[in-house]
Image (cartoon, rainbow, N blue to C red):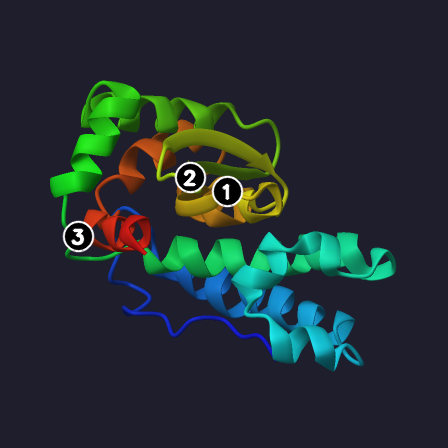
Amino acid sequence: MYDKIQLPYSYDALEPYIDAETVNIHYNKHLQTYVNNLNKILEGYDDLVNKYTLKELLFNIEKVPKRIRQDVINQGGGVYNHNLYFSILSPNPTKCPTGKFLNEINKAFGSFDKLKKNLTEASIKQFGSGYGCLVKDKHGKLMIMKTPNQNCPLNEKLIPILMIDVWEHAYYLKYKNLRQNYVENIWNVIDWAKVEEYYNK
């Protein structure tokens, strides 16, 4: 069975940027629903569950039987994307990347500030629900992409290392229709040490 991560902070720890009620509902209701749905879909598919981590399952999505493949993309993506999103947020974040990771950012985007600007723009402009993502390819090259719904970059053989959730349930209680304000504020709680850890894996 697949599961959600243990939330590494209290519900109110990300305030004032993300409110306690949003974190609670987002984590315990929305994410838990994806977990429940995914495990129900995979009942009877022990060969997949026992062989693959969720990351491996989504990366090798072509090995999932066609009759459940889209459901696994939707629900499995919902679990993986949310787990990554919650894991890179912190009440005491490292505000800047370092070392090789920073060098790769500079190489790909020109500067750290340009990366933040471009990813902010991609997240705000994602039409409808989805994510703004920082991903790396198998060579470690960094790219920004937008993904609709719960599609995951892993399905395209790309490794997400930072995801900004722009589904309305991620921000609407506090920010209402002002997605831009939410995205601009989320940089205050993104932990670059965690993102760098994912890059180096």
Residue at 39% over, 39% down: 139
**Can you tell which mark lies on residue 135?**
2
Closest to the observer: 200 or 178? 200
Q: CA distance from mark 1 to mark 2?
A: 6 Å
- The numbered mark, 1 or 2, whose residue comes first in the sequence reads 2
Residue at 29% over, 26% down: 115
- The numbered mark, 3 or 2, whose residue comes first in the sequence reads 3
Kind of residue sitting beneath label 2: Val
Instruction: Tell me residue 112's x, y (percent).
Output: 20, 28
Residue at 26% over, 47% down: 190
Closest to the observer: 114 or 177? 114
Position of residue 128 in the picture relative to residue 28 (left or right): right
**Can you tell which mark lies on residue 93?**
3
- The numbered mark, 3 or 1, whose residue comes first in the sequence reads 3
Kind of residue sitting beneath label 3: Pro
Q: Residue furthest right?
A: 67
Q: CA distance from mark 3 to mark 1?
A: 25 Å
Q: Is residue 97 visible?
A: no
Q: Secondary structure at mark 2?
A: strand
